Amino acid sequence: MTAISKERKQLVYFIESSECFDNIAKPRLILTALGVKPGCYCALKITPKNLDDKFHFEAHLKRAGLFFKHSPAKSFEEISEIRGNAVMWSLKGAWYGYDIFNSRDLMNKFRKYADLSMKNKHAEADRLAGLIYGYPACCIKQYVRDHKNNEFKLTYDALKKAQDLDKKFPFVSNNACSLKCRKTSALNKKYETALKTYAKHFYRQYSAPLAVKTDLIVEGINALDKGNEYALLSVSKINGHHMILSYISREKYEQGAVLGGIATIKYDYADIKIKKVKKMLEGLHHIRKLPLLGKK
Ligand SMILES: [Zn+2]
């Protein structure tokens, strides 16, 4: 890796310490800031606690010589409380989607990619996206082939494979062509080394497992060919939040079942172990409190 400028180091420090990025956004953003990854997409969340962060982030990006654009603001909610069978949501703030690039040329390529995507020219678009995000050639090839053959079906095996890949290669954001992909393995190692060297604080937090014993409420069920994909709601807070976690299993659980288990968060995924079904919650429902205009 070439020497990292002072401005880029300051940007990395901002990303590490800011509250506006989650663990999906942080690694790809830091790697792009270090110039190890050509470009990335990420979400920036603004709440009343960090109103200035958007301004600061963009000032850092400009000083570091990065190119970017962002989407219009959209609001987001979070679960504030679980009271019996009621899940209470409240409006938390606004989020923006950022596309960030290491050169103007990459930003122009991204415009071309968006245009090709809109015209349903998937093969050309996917190849360009792979280049913009720094994906290995073998994985891009496989992805283009799967896209052409429409092989993105949500099957048990496909989801299981996606989870296994994510666990094996937690630092990359590409769909690796296989668990044995050498290019992805080398890239994963390279990214890990860069984070360990230039973003120690984040690296330690990201790679340390956090195991939380919690009840998990079956909130949603997506039927697969064998088994189901469940959306599980953590009754205990994990890193300060009630989380909705994806869990695939061949076991059958009903909507509203309360499962006793352990959720272990590591990198950007949760490993879930279910111990037993504790009880059933009748009439599980969501309550959304949106502040109305003109009301106090
Ligand atoms: Zn590959």
Image (tube, rainbow, N blue to C red):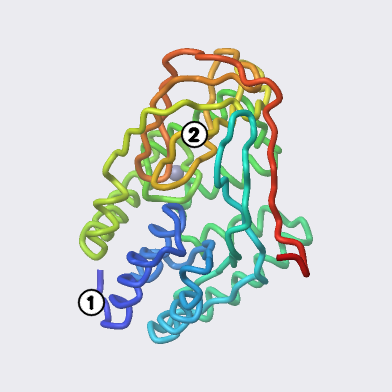
Work out whether mark 2 precedes mark 1 in sequence or the reverse, and give the earlier one: 1
Q: How crowded is mark 1: few (under 14 residues within 10 Å), some or many (20 or more)?
A: few
Indicate whether 69 appears above or below 205. Answer: below
| Kind of element beneath mark 2 | strand
| Kind of element beneath mark 1 | loop
Q: Residue at x 49, y 81 (%)?
A: 55
Left-right relation of 169 to 197:
right
Instruction: Identify the disc placed on residue 234.
Output: 2
**Does mark 2's beta carbon lie closer than 8 Å to ligand 1?**
no
Indicate whether 205 appears above or below 264. Answer: below
Residue at mark 1: 3
Q: Nearer the viewer, mark 2 or mark 1?
A: 2
Q: Do the residues labelled 2 and 1 touch (CB within 8 Å)?
A: no
Closer to the camera in the image, 177 or 91: 91
Question: The C terminus is located in which quarter?
Answer: bottom right
Q: Which residue is drawn at 76% across and 62% down?
A: 292
The percent coordinates of residue 30 (x first, y second) are 37, 65
Q: What residue type is labelled 1?
A: Ala
Q: Distance between the residues labelled 2 and 1?
A: 43 Å
Q: Which amino acid does label 2 sit on?
A: Ser
Indicate whether 77 appears above or below 215. Answer: below
